[in-house]
Amino acid sequence: MRRLLGLSAVFAAAVCAFAGDKPAAPGLTVDADKRLVVIPAKVAPRKLAHLDQVYPIEVIATWAYRDGKKGKAHETVVTTEVLPSEVHKALERLGAKAGKPARGEGAKAVGPEVTVFIEVTQPDGTAKRLTMDKVLLDPKTKKPLPKGVKFLFTGSAQVEVEPGKPGTVYGADLTGTLLAIFPVTDETVCQSSLTMAEEKYLKLDVNKDALPAEGTAVKLVLEVVAK
């Protein structure tokens, strides 16, 4: 019950009016003309202090590690503090309609396409946008994420607040995951077109030559391609 009340308060705080480029939530902005959702983020650490190894990248963006909380901070490109349901609402305001997330073997994500960028501020103050094929690579072969991989606005699965009792919440708001590469979770806002079949052999890491140092402030940019 306490968790439900806390989440209700968070959801209430997240409700806001979208008008032009005004902030949609603390730190999150929407550019209606360019059909962009811009999210503040930081380059994530690849090794967390409480873990004994570095895990392959499975998500693009999620919350930073929270002691004792379930999450994917150990296998992400960037971290952010934005509530996933806020991002969902922002994409809807741009005309996109959520599809359906995938989870497990044989499942495929469904939804309108979004282009994903990591925006990095250059020394001269200009902004450089990196697509995921520039950000991710196979550490053994050095081959980038295939350019044909798409990201889809699936929306998150709803999760029971208490098993067996009425009432659900936006699942991604419990773990903080915004973008998943593989359908290892359906508690996310967007997923790629990859399936668990590819996950078995496509082990990814960040391209450190493309990204700035861990902890550097960057922006996660989502562009709505189609409704």
Image (spheres, rainbow, N blue to C red):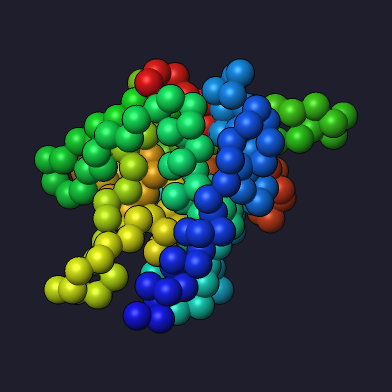
Instruction: In the displayed orientation, state which residue is furthest to the right.
Output: 124
Instruction: In the displayed orientation, state which residue is furthest to the left.
Output: 106
Residue at 51% from the left image edge and 77% from the top image edge: 67
Is residue 38 something one can see in this rendering?
A: no
Q: Is residue 137 left or right of residue 161?
A: right
Residue at 52% from the left image edge and 72% from the top image edge: 66
Instruction: Please determine whether, in this image, residue 49 is positioned above or below residue 77.
Output: below
Which x, y percent locates residue 50?
50, 77
Instruction: Please determine whether, in this image, residue 138 is positioned above or below residue 160.
Output: above
Q: Is residue 13 left or right of residue 6?
A: right
The C terminus - image quarter: top left
Which x, y percent locates residue 199?
27, 44
- Residue 129's quadrant in the figure? top right
Which x, y percent locates residue 187?
32, 53
Is residue 100 something one can see in this rendering?
A: yes
Taking depth in this image into account, of 150 and 227 the one nearest to the observer is: 227
Which x, y percent locates residue 142?
47, 34
Q: Is residue 199 left or right of residue 23?
A: left
The N terminus - image quarter: bottom left
Residue at 52% from the left image edge and 32% from the top image edge: 222
- Residue 146's quadrant in the figure? top left
Taking depth in this image into account, of 95 and 207 the one nearest to the observer is: 95
Taking depth in this image into account, of 123 and 113 the one nearest to the observer is: 113
Residue at 76% from the left image edge and 35% from the top image edge: 121
Taking depth in this image into account, of 19 and 130 the one nearest to the observer is: 19
- Residue 135's quadrant in the figure? top right
Instruction: Please determine whether, in this image, residue 86 is positioned above or below residue 130.
Output: below
